[in-house]
Image: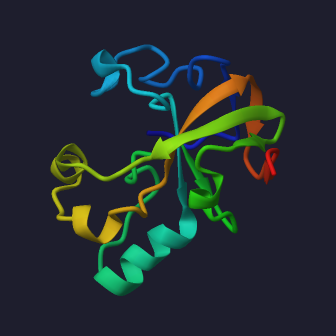
Amino acid sequence: MVSLEHVEARAGGGLAGDRYDMEIGHWSPIKRRGDWLTLIEQEEIDRLAAEWGLPLGPGESRRNLTTRGVRLDTLLGRRFRIGPVVCLAARRAEPCTYLEQLLGREIIYPLVHKAGIRVEILDGGSIALGDPVWLLDD
């Protein structure tokens, strides 16, 4: 996991150069909806550290994008934009034992229903650091 200033999001696929876009991610063979782009709230990462004593460093959440000031659950089943990129929030990104194994910490319980969302990219484009996220469907 590396931090980027901008990345190309591909419609019907993922982020250019990402393990899921290249179909080599851990869950790639299953081809679940929304596995190509994942988001997590910075507020939940902060809560995990403050309430549970489980800080996550950059990239440790294993999510592609970290948002601030956006309640991701409110996007579920809806279309939204990240900068110019149109997305559909397909489902929650629940924590799993694979994530626990990678981190060497027990984080499933404190992250249940709080580990972000999985997203389908409907219209691609370039996502830049700081791009706004806004709802398209009412």
Q: Nearer the viewer, residue 12 or 47?
A: 12
Where is 52 relative to 125, above or below? Answer: below
In x, y percent, where is residue 105?
18, 63
Q: Residue furthest front?
A: 138
Q: Position of residue 72 (x, y in %)?
A: 60, 58
Q: Residue at x 27, y 27 (%)?
A: 26
**Rendered position, 62 above or below 19:** below
The residue at 56%/23% (across/down) is: 14
Residue at 49% from the left image edge and 18% from the top image edge:
21
Query: Residue 86: x, y in percent?
Result: 76, 33
Closer to the camera, 46 or 71?
A: 71
Position in image of residue 41 (x %, y %): 55, 62
Task: Evaluate whether residue 107 shows in this view.
Answer: no
Whether residue 128 is visible, yes or no, is yes
Q: How is the image coloured?
A: rainbow
Q: In which quarter of the view is residue 106 placed? A: bottom left
What is the quadrant of the N terminus in the image?
top left
Task: Kindly identify the residue that appears in the image at 39 percent across and 62 percent down.
Answer: 113
How many numbered marks appear?
0
128 relative position to 26: left or right: right
Looking at the image, residue 102 sits to the left or right of residue 58; the answer is: left
* Left or right relative to 33: residue 56: left
